[in-house]
Amino acid sequence: MMDDGRLVLCVPDQSEVLICNKDGSNVDNIPVRGTPCCITTVNSSTVAIVVVKPFRSSYIEIYDINYKNKLKWIQVAGMKSASGISTINNKLVVGGLRKLMIVDHQGEETIQKIKIRCTPEAIHASDNKIFFKNHRTGFISNEMKKLKWYSFSGKKEQSKILPSDPYSITSLRDGSLYVLCIDGSIHHVSGDLKDEKTVNTNNIEALKSGYIISCNAKQNTMVLRNNMILSIFQEQH
C-alpha cells in the first residue's frame, strides 16, 4: 500500500499492475512486458516489481505509478521470483537458493548476500529483520510451519512454529506481525516474536490462498486479495 492509501497489485495473468483505492474505486493499470509476480513500495510514488520474462529470466523493474512509466530495470544474478520482494533501509530485499540478497536499486547492484538454511518465500522486511517462510517442497513437516526471520542486530536466523504453514506476512507500526497461513487462519505475532494468537475473522474460507495487502490496527481491519477479489476483514471479539 502506498502512503496515500492506494493499493498497487500485480495481475500476472494479464501482464499488468493494478492501482486502486481500498474500496476498489479509481481503478487504473500499468501494462508490464512479462509476468509481474510480486511488488513492494520504494517511496511515495515508485514501486519495485519482480517480473518474469520469457524463458524464465527474472528482473526487478522500478515504476513511477503516477506517470505510469518504467524508470529502470535491474538483473539480479540468482534471484528467485517465488521468493518475493520487500524494502529495508531504502534497499530492496529478494531471495535466492538458500540466501537473502540486499539490492541497491539506485546503484543497481547487489550489496549483500546473507546465507540462510532454506530458499525463502513470502519475504517481508520490517525494522532490522527480514521475515520469510520455507520454500514448499511437498513434504509435510514442522519445517513448513515455521515463520523464519533474519535479524541484522544478532546476525542470525531464527524461527517460530505456527499452527499452520505461513503464506503471507505483513507488519504493523508497533513491530508486530500478521501472518496469513495456508489453512486460512490469521495469527498476530508480537513485536518481540515471543507471543502469538489466532485472530478471529468472519469468513475463513475466503482467506485461504489469499494475500495480505494492508492492515489498519486502529480499526482492526485488514485488506486481503484472493485472485481478483479484494476483501476487507475485521477481527471479531
Image (cartoon, rainbow, N blue to C red):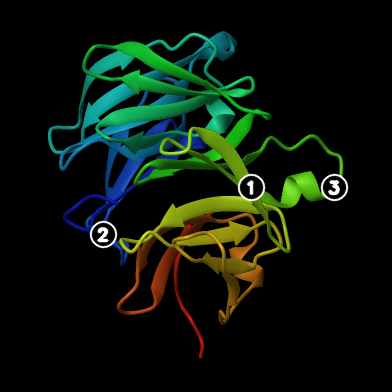
Compared to residue 23, the image places residue 155 above or below, namely above
Image position, residue 130 (x, y; %): 46, 40
Residue 141 disc label? 3
Image position, residue 196 (x, y; %): 59, 69
Secondary structure at numbered mark 2: loop
Q: Nearer the viewer, mark 1 or mark 3?
A: 1
Q: Residue at x 43, y 30 (%)?
A: 15
Compared to residue 55, the image places residue 22 above or below, namely below
Image-based side of 199 in relation to 87, left or right: right
- Residue matched to label 2: 21
Question: In front: 35, or 40?
Answer: 40
Question: In front: 108, or 101?
Answer: 101
Q: Is residue 227 visible to the viewer in this orientation of the structure?
A: no
Amino acid type, residue under disc 3 in the picture: Ser
Q: Residue at x 66, y 70 (%)?
A: 205
Image-based side of 38 in relation to 187, left or right: left
Q: Is residue 229 visible to the viewer in this orientation of the structure?
A: yes
Q: Nearer the viewer, mark 2 or mark 3?
A: 3
Image-based side of 2 in relation to 211, left or right: left
Q: Which of marks 3 and 2 precedes in the sequence?
A: 2
Secondary structure at numbered mark 3: loop
Marks 2 and 1, Cα distance to the nearest angstrom?
35 Å
Amino acid type, residue under disc 1 in the picture: Ser
The quadrant holding residue 86 is: top left
Question: In front: 3, or 154?
Answer: 154
- Residue at the far bottom: name it: 237
Marks 2 and 3, Cα distance to the nearest angstrom?
39 Å
Q: Which of marks 3 and 1 precedes in the sequence?
A: 3
- Residue matched to label 1: 159
Amino acid type, residue under disc 2 in the picture: Asn
Image position, residue 165 (x, y; %): 71, 53
